Image (cartoon, rainbow, N blue to C red):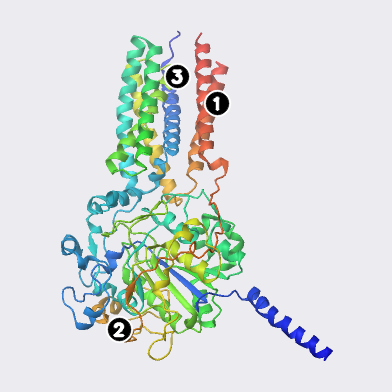
Amino acid sequence: MKYLIVLISILVILTFLAPAVNASVTPTTKTPIKHVINIFFENHTFDNFFGIYPENPPGNNSSLNLNISVPLNLLSNSSLLSKLSQIPPGTFSTADPIEGYLPYHEDWNYGLMNEFAAGSGKQSMTYFTASQVSPLWDLAEQYSIADNYFAPQISESAPNTLYYLAGFSPVFNDYGPPPNIPINETIFGEMNNYHISWGVYVNGTSKNFDMSQYISGINNYSSNINSWGNFTQELSNGTLPSVSYVFSQDANGYDMGAPSNILKGELWLLMLINSIETSPIWNSTAVFITWDDPGGYYDQVSPPVFDGVQLGMRLPLIVVSPYAKENYVSNTLMTHSSILSFIDYNWNMPALNHFVSSLPLPLDMFNFNVPYANGMIARGPIRFNNFPLPDSLEFTLNSSQLQFNYSSQFPVTPQIEFSSLPYERNGSYSINLSNLNAGIYVRSDYSVTPFAYSPYAVVLFLLIDAILLFVLLRRQKNGRR
Amino acid sequence: MEEDRPGKKVARLVDAIFFSSVQESFIALALGYLLSVIYLIGDTRQLTPLLAGIIAGTIIFTIVSTLAGEFGRRKFAGETLVIVILLSISAYIIADLLVFHTGYQFSDLFLAVIGAMIISPVMLVQQYSQLIFRVNRIASKATVSSISSVLMIVIIVLFAFVYEKGGQTMLSEKVEVIGTISIVLTLIEIGIIRRL
């Protein structure tokens, strides 16, 4: 009897210990998502890519088109639509709209959104159709898209990308460093602290990760920064880290930023999505696809001020996942840092900072609970093989890819009939990490500027120069005497 | 005062041009940096209105400086210098107020106006260097002011080019490099005068 009591006691203790030991090795998640993949492009607004979604051809709709959820776009405002030019079929680029802090503010015109032609130029007043962007429209139809997602700043890449990685920015335009952000203030630092694996993937080596210049201490993690080739390899091995950032930005036009041919970025994206959908981790993955800043293109929605931050123009956000709702349009107010809030939420971490804690979570874009008619909650993979995809992630567009009839690829037959979906196909969510008492990881964000590179040093130089000039004048006068 | 020989006079004018163009560039870039508007110089699209303003400001303030200098030489030199200082400071304060009042939200024209105003201390530097290098005649003053102003614009354009090519990083370092050159030049000049 005595031995039996001891044995039961040991078993009880082991039962309690087991989950604790397990938790320290593999961090638990609040959802079935074990892998978040962030794919980042350049310079397009929501109305520029989804302005007339899902009309194809424009002005003429099939019954399937008419059934697709329509986001807030140009279709609801014919007078606005008439002011913009449609990019003709066969053309996959525009002249580069004028970019910059000042042109974007002129476009914005204190929220009136009526000076794009003056600020970014007449090329900003354009929109793409299914003839060019059917790959993106197919993803939006099969998965979830947000129509209330804004750039964090009315500015260019640097501040917006810093909000994407750190939830704040010490620079207001594309300049710097300095200032630098300590890695502990970024999502990378927080994930390090909570033992969440992460990786950054760029075209080439870790030196090609532009934003690393801003993040002091990231050089200690250069092994986390790898090439696109490493990404696909880790994907197929099932060894991808918990959170991945795939940057399309390079000099070869994969990032869709004007004047690049957007088709290159789209086919590159479909290659990635196909690789993800056929990988061993598909059932536990969420892919967030977005663009860094508006690039000067028109969007009709006046960006709101959120938590004291004047947000920038509206951008597309597409979520691809077996748990992403099909053909769902999210009206939740979001920005780049909302993806950080999802990562924090999913891995039971505190909000990275106050701004992240205040943003509504993008949870309405997922269905984690209600089974489909087949009893499953996770959807199977969808392969986008009807498009003329290249053989590898690094490629040059060929004539067959350029001449392909992209318009014919939208809409596609939905994976699950819209009528049998167990949820509404649009909606919003208002709960944030603050409401969930998740806590805050970085109480007060700060950036570092060494004295030698600070305004104080410039003032010191001015003072020294002024004093020496004064001495020089005095000596010169004395010399004359 | 002993008249300079022609060769020495030319050397002095060249000295004045070189000296004041570097000083002017440093002061314009440093004040632009402190107003944060010079950050915009790295973007080729924003460079155009900013540079247009800088060129317009240079022309205006060079003319004002030359006329004021001439007026001061004939009438009351000390008072003229005070007026030039006050004008420079006023223009700079107006630029400062415009930038911070608008929260950097302004049109290209507005940026050009601010670009012109941050150049106002050029007047002061020109007056100063003409006193230092004893440039007295109106023709010499106009020549020295014009050439040094053109050189200053060339230095600012080169600065913008290097800044843009360098990925718009380390702005203060680049301003400080020009600052160091201008300080070294001043020290050299102090040394030269000491030997006289």
Disc 3 versus disc 1: distance between alpha carbons? Answer: 14 Å
**How would you rate the neighbour count of disc 3 (Cα within 10 Å): few for under 14, some for 14-19, many for 20 or more?**
some
Q: For mark 2, what is the residue?
A: A418
Q: Quadrant of residue A385?
A: bottom left
Question: Taking A182 as reference, is A334 left or right?
Answer: left
Total marks shown come to: 3
Q: Amino acid at mark 3?
A: Phe
Disc 3 versus disc 2: distance between alpha carbons? Answer: 84 Å
Q: Assign a secondary structure to mark 1.
A: helix
Question: Which residue is depicted at the point 45% across and 37% down?
Answer: B34
Q: Position of residue A237 (x, y in %)?
A: 54, 82
Earlier sequence position, callout 3 versus callout 1 = 3
Q: For mark 1, what is the residue?
A: B187
- Chain under numbered label 2: A
**How would you rate the neighbour count of disc 2 (Cα within 10 Å): few for under 14, some for 14-19, many for 20 or more?**
some
Q: For mark 3, what is the residue?
A: B133
Asked if badge 3 and badge 1 are on a common chain, one would say yes
Q: Nearer the viewer, mark 1 or mark 2?
A: 2
Q: Amino acid at mark 1?
A: Leu
Q: Assign a secondary structure to mark 2.
A: helix
Q: Assign a secondary structure to mark 3.
A: loop
